[in-house]
Amino acid sequence: MPRSGAILLLSVALLAQRAAAAQPAESAASQDAQSLAEVLVTAAKLPRETLKRIASQFVKSHAAVNPVIHQIGRWSTALCPRVTGLKPAASAFVMKRVTGVARSIGAPASQVGKGCPVNLEIVFTAEPQQLLNHIAKAYPSLLGSSRTPGDAIARRAVQSWYTTGTKAPDGWSPPIGDEAAMAVLQMGVDMSTPPGGIARDGARVDPAYGEGFAGFGRPGSYFTQGLSSEFLQVLVIVDSGKIAQDSLSSVADYVAMLALTRVNLLDGCSELPSILDLLSSGCGQRQKPAGLTDTDTAYLKALYASDLEKRLNLEQGDIRDRMVTAIAGR
């Protein structure tokens, strides 16, 4: 874990303990799972081309593209969460749920309770803007590789920030030299933290949004980039006041979705049901799911099974086709 992340924990813990006055209700109004099942049954009976079109839109809204190399990202190292701002039992529940979802869809995840370098920080707080102000001033690198002018503003009930890395098939050449390494160490962070630095698994840490060196990969191929995008560190902040009427299990599933994929559109409403509908402003009166839907599971399994060194259109098509097969059963 980056030293900056370790130092941040104390600050996050203090802020979260003061701010976590509101806790999500474990049993809000009961959801009608049958209506969601009916939606999926209907989807399975759609003509295959129609289902492919809907699934394609689902993939594009649920899988944001890395702006540096134009690839879809995911975890390649074991996800290791830490939850701050909840009572111990609730924190344990969220950690167990997130890692359980990760393992169930084929993503790498550490066992709960085992010592591991934390790379997923989940913070519940009733004062998210105060926390974001602190992070932006003291630890801006924790806001990730997608830095934009407005990314330190608390706008949503649940928000996420991603530090990403770019992996080359044969490693990076030339590797980071001793002089650069000394400069990194003098900054008080380890080698996996600074933009341009090399993470432990060989990925180059991406710089601010849309900037930096993209690498060469295999530019002569029509089918593969020869580069892949991966998550190195994810920060999720939950406004406990805004989710107080939602069950903790629903919120945990929403957090799991944001932890496992970088969502492109949070306020839209796909024709297929998603846990993202829980907090979306675009779904109107449509039934909100109580947890991850079968569509979400089909998407996440496809995401973590697909070849993400392919060119973007082929990546998206591969994920879509795997989804369609899972939903239609053939």
Image (cartoon, helix red, strand yellow):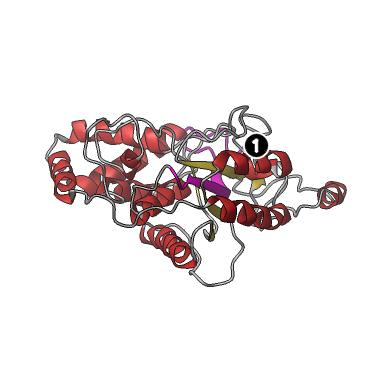
Residue at the top extreme, as displayed? 149
Q: Count of labels shown? A: 1
Residue type for callout 1: Gly
Image quarter where the N terminus lies is bottom right
Task: Pinpoint residue 115: horizontal percent, then vertical percent.
Answer: 59, 71
Whether residue 194 is visible? yes
Residue 222 in the magenta stretch? The answer is: yes
Quadrant housing residue 313:
top left
Range of magenta residues: 216-241
Instruction: Kindly identify which residue carries mark 1.
Output: 215
Q: Residue at x 63, y 36 (%)?
A: 216
Is 135 situated left or right of 275 in this image?
right
**Residue occupying image coordinates x 66% and y 43%:** 135
Place of residue 310 in the rendered image (x, y in percent of width and height, measured from the top left) = 47, 40
Corner quadrant of residue 207: top right
Between 14 and 212, which is closer to the camera in this rendering? 14
**Crowding at label 1, few (<14), some or many (≥20) Cα neighbours within 10 Å?**
some
